[in-house]
């Protein structure tokens, strides 16, 4: 087992940061989404504008269709004029009257009366022509000549309506071009704003992620012993709280006469001894054990505890392994090698609490020291 800090604390810290993160980024993210929504609204509006405009300018309604009516009316009058020039008989006269009446119906349109001043006089001429044909008191050639003015008026109407249609097409083209420019530039602007807001959101996200990682690193450092790399007293408390329902073994380890070792060998040698003993304790205890340095030469180990007998075997194994390691201790009062005093207890945090368990293990350690050190002892929690 390697003496490392429990990684669950890092995960918890990251989860907490992730839970807090959405509230921080709602501003830029919402602005970005609103920009893209505005872009979609603009596109939909432009799409809905085009169809009514096409209907307005190119449908078979409204006054633009007047050119077609004028053309048909002119054709009827020209057919009637041709009949009258051929010295028509009764049947031809009747056919000419029919053509003139059909032309009259197509000619008598409100838009023609409103837009062209020749309409009403031309319709009067057509009425008089029909009356003259029915009475048969005027030569057909003269009546054919009278139709020239209505035909000229209809030609004027055709040309005028064609001009109006051209103007309508030009207006539609200009408006369509303008709308296209508005759509293109507005879309680019809105899209640019959307990307800008998204970039600001992403930058803030990365900055906060970096700050979160830095905070986690500082939290890890705050929970670790800088010399040995294992957990400290705060980490021990936190790990116990995370395993409140588990049966745990708490082992306290103290290096015998460590002050004398430091005074004789120097602090660098003392630091090296602490690091060596951490590795030794980690090898002696089971893989599930987590190590902590409580201060100075005092260490603790937290591990699953099936029963007191299993905890005793671990303590015995640790004690023997230190003896077998034979670390030199020139300042030991009994001229021994480095030895350990070990106190332990077995407890369930939710039932007895950490403080009572620690007092029991510390009491066991005190009894070992009182009895001469270099031993281990287990006391049940009172």
Image (cartoon, grey):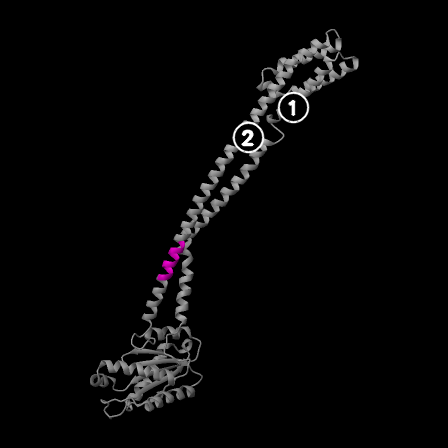
Q: Nearer the viewer, residue 48 or 141?
A: 141
Return the x and y of residue 42 as percentages of the image width and height. Answer: 49, 42
Secondary structure beneath disc 1? helix
- Residue 79: say if magenta: no
Please say if 124 is above or below 300.
above
In the rendered image, the residue lying farthest to the top is: 137
- Place residue 263 in its image quadrant: bottom left
Q: Is residue 141 left or right of residue 274?
A: right
- Bin the neighbour count of mark 1 within 10 Å (Cα to Cα): few under 14, some 14-19, many 20 and up: many
Residue at the (51%, 42%) spot, across then down: 43
Question: Could you say which disc has been placed on residue 41 in the image?
Answer: none
Q: Main secondary structure of the magenta part?
A: helix
Q: CA distance from mark 2 to mark 1?
A: 20 Å
> Is residue 250 at all visible to an observer of this figure?
yes
In the rendered image, the residue lying farthest to the front is: 86
In the rendered image, the residue lying farthest to the right is: 90
Kindly identify which residue carries mark 1.
69
- Residue 202: say if magenta: yes
Residue at the (67%, 11%) spot, across then down: 145
Q: Nearer the viewer, residue 24 or 357?
A: 24
Counting labels gives 2
Kindly identify which residue carries mark 2.
169
> Is residue 362 at all visible to an observer of this figure?
no
Please say if 293 is above or below 67.
below
**Mark positioned earlier in the residue sequence (2 or 1):** 1
- Place residue 308 in its image quadrant: bottom left
- Place residue 162 in its image quadrant: top right
Please say if 81 is above or below 327.
above
Return the x and y of residue 116 as percentages of the image width and height. Answer: 58, 18
Magenta segment, which residues? 201-210
Secondary structure beneath disc 2? helix
């Amino acid at each position: 087992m390697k003496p490392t800090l429990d990684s669950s604390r890092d995960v918890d810290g990251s989860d907490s940061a992730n839970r807090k993160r959405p509230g921080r980024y709602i501003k830029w993210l919402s602005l970005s989404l609103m920009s893209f929504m505005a872009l979609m609204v603009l596109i939909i509006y432009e799409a809905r504008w085009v169809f009514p405009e096409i209907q307005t300018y190119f449908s078979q309604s409204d006054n633009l269709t007047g050119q077609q009516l004028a053309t048909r009316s002119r054709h009827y009058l020209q057919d009637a004029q041709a009949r009258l020039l051929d010295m028509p008989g009764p049947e031809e006269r009747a056919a000419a009257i029919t053509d003139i009446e059909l032309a009259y119906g197509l000619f008598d349109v409100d838009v023609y009366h409103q837009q062209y001043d020749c309409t009403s006089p031309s319709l009067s001429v057509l009425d008089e022509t029909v009356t003259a044909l029915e009475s048969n008191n005027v030569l057909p050639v003269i009546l054919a000549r009278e139709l020239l003015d209505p035909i000229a008026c209809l030609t004027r109407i055709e040309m005028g309506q064609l001009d109006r249609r051209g103007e309508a097409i030009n207006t539609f083209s200009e408006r369509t071009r303008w709308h296209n420019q508005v759509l293109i530039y507005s879309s680019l602007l809105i899209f640019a704003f959307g990307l800008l807001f998204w970039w600001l959101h992403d930058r803030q996200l990365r900055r906060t992620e970096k700050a979160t990682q830095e905070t986690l690193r500082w939290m890890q450092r705050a929970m670790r012993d800088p010399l040995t790399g294992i957990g400290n007293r705060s980490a021990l408390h936190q790990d116990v709280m995370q395993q409140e329902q588990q049966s745990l073994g708490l082992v306290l380890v103290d290096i015998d006469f460590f002050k004398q070792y430091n005074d004789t060998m120097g602090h660098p040698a003392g630091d090296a001894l602490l690091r060596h003993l951490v590795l030794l304790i980690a090898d002696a205890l089971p893989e599930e054990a987590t190590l902590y340095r409580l201060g100075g030469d005092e260490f603790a180990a937290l591990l699953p505890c099936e029963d007191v007998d299993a905890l005793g075997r671990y303590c015995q194994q640790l004690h023997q392994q230190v003896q077998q390691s034979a670390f030199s201790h020139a300042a030991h009062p009994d001229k021994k090698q480095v030895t350990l005093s070990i106190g332990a207890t077995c407890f369930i945090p939710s039932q007895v609490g950490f403080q009572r368990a620690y007092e029991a293990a510390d009491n066991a350690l005190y009894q070992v020291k009182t009895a001469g050190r270099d031993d281990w002892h287990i006391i049940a929690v009172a």
